[in-house]
Amino acid sequence: MMMLKSPTFVDETGYFLGRNLETTFCEPNESLRLIRGKFGDERYSNLVALSDRMRAHFAADPENQTNDTVKGGKSSSRWKSC
């Protein structure tokens, strides 16, 4: 869902009402918080910072007209490698 609906993440199908940029990034951050003890503080902090950067890129380009959406997508790839 993250890359398919970027940069606004609004669900146009009606199946996920209330889905938007804020809710999309709240989910992984809350999940990270729940498993913080398994990751350790340093890795947790790095992943939350990466999530915040991804969100900032998508928020900066809501019309998908600049390179910020691309930068957010590249950050997403780094997220997966962590």
Image: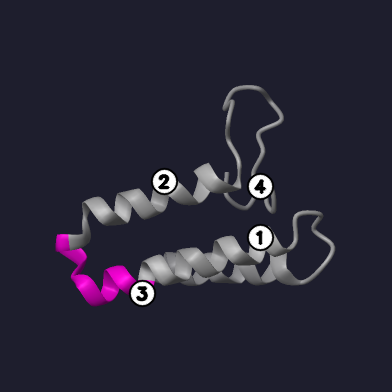
Which amino acid type corresponds to the residue marked 3 in the rendered image?
Asn
- Judging by the rendered image, the residue that carries numbered circle 3 is 46
Taken as a whole, is the magenta stretch helix, strand or loop? helix
Mark 3 crowdedness (10 Å alpha carbons): few <14, some 14-19, many ≥20: few
Provide the secondary structure element on which disc 4 rests: loop
43 within the magenta span:
yes
Q: Distance between the residues labelled 4 and 1?
A: 13 Å
Give residue 15's mark.
none
Give residue 58's mark.
1
Q: Quadrant of the C terminus?
A: bottom left
Pinpoint residue 53: horizontal percent, then vertical percent: 53, 70
Pinpoint residue 58: horizontal percent, then vertical percent: 66, 60
Residue at x 71%, y 69% (from the top left corner): 68
Which amino acid type corresponds to the residue marked 2 in the rendered image?
Glu
Front position among marks 2 and 4: 2
In the image, residue 64 sits, relative to residue 30, either above or below, namely below
- Judging by the rendered image, the residue that carries numbered circle 4 is 4
Q: Give the range drawn in magenta.
A: 37-46
Q: Distance between the residues labelled 3 and 2?
A: 16 Å
Q: Distance between the residues labelled 2 and 4?
A: 17 Å
Provide the secondary structure element on which disc 2 rests: helix
- Judging by the rendered image, the residue that carries numbered circle 2 is 27
Q: Look at the numbered discs 2 and 1 and tell me whether their residues touch, using CB distance below 8 Å.
A: no
Q: Would you identify the image quadrant in which residue 35 lies?
A: bottom left
Front in this rendered view, residue 60 or 79 = 60
In the image, residue 38 sits, relative to residue 5, either above or below, namely below
Mark 1 crowdedness (10 Å alpha carbons): few <14, some 14-19, many ≥20: many
Query: Closer to the N terminus: mark 3 or mark 2?
Result: 2
Residue at x 48%, y 72% (from the top left corner): 78
